[in-house]
Image (tube, rainbow, N blue to C red):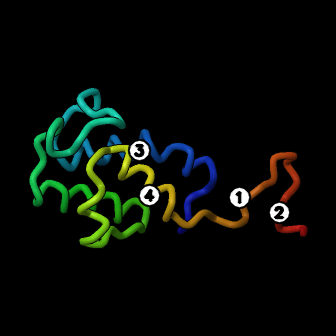
Amino acid sequence: MCPSNTEVAAIPERAIELIASALSLDESDIREESHFMDDLGTDEMDMMRVFSALEDEYGVEVSDDEAEVLETVEDVINHIQDNVQVDDEELVTLDGVDDMDD
């Protein structure tokens, strides 16, 4: 099932929760600017757990090539936001008119 716009807006907070759980860290230790290796001490196996948790939650896969450039929590959040499929029925224009009527 595709997330709604409201759920997409909550991606940063939820991603941090999932990352904390996957790494057995406290959420307060993780910020968007945190670097996985330098700040959070992750290794390749840790990152596999992180990507697996995020894929389960959002259905967004991370290729090996993408994994090499996702160095910070913010990088991962941006990757999810750029690739998550949003439920079309939830899309609205800025003036509140349903885009489905166009």
Q: Does residue 18 appear left or right of residue 36 in this picture?
A: right
Q: Is residue 8 above or below residue 68?
A: above
Near mark 1 (Cα within 10 A), the count class, few <14, some 14-19 or many ≥20, is some
**In which quadrant of the rendered view does residue 59 lie?**
bottom left
Q: Which mark is residue 24?
A: none
Q: Secondary structure at mark 2?
A: helix
| Mark 1 residue type | Glu
Near mark 2 (Cα within 10 A), the count class, few <14, some 14-19 or many ≥20, is few
Near mark 3 (Cα within 10 A), the count class, few <14, some 14-19 or many ≥20, is some
Q: Does residue 20 appear left or right of residue 94 in this picture?
A: left
User: Which is more toward the observer, 43 or 86?
Assistant: 43
User: Which is more toward the observer, 83 or 26?
Assistant: 83
Q: Which mark is residue 99?
A: 2
- Distance between the alpha carbons at the discs numbered 1 and 2: 9 Å
Q: Does residue 45 appear left or right of residue 7 in this picture?
A: left
- Distance between the alpha carbons at the discs numbered 2 and 4: 23 Å
> Mark 1 = which residue?
90
| Mark 3 residue type | Arg
Residue at left 26%, top 50%?
Answer: 71
Near mark 4 (Cα within 10 A), the count class, few <14, some 14-19 or many ≥20, is many
- Distance between the alpha carbons at the discs numbered 1 and 4: 18 Å
Q: Secondary structure at mark 1?
A: helix
Say which label, 1 or 3, has the lower sequence index.
Answer: 3
- Distance between the alpha carbons at the discs numbered 2 and 3: 27 Å
> Mark 3 = which residue?
14
Say which label, 3 or 4, has the lower sequence index.
Answer: 3
Residue at left 20%, top 45%?
Answer: 36
> Mark 4 = which residue?
80
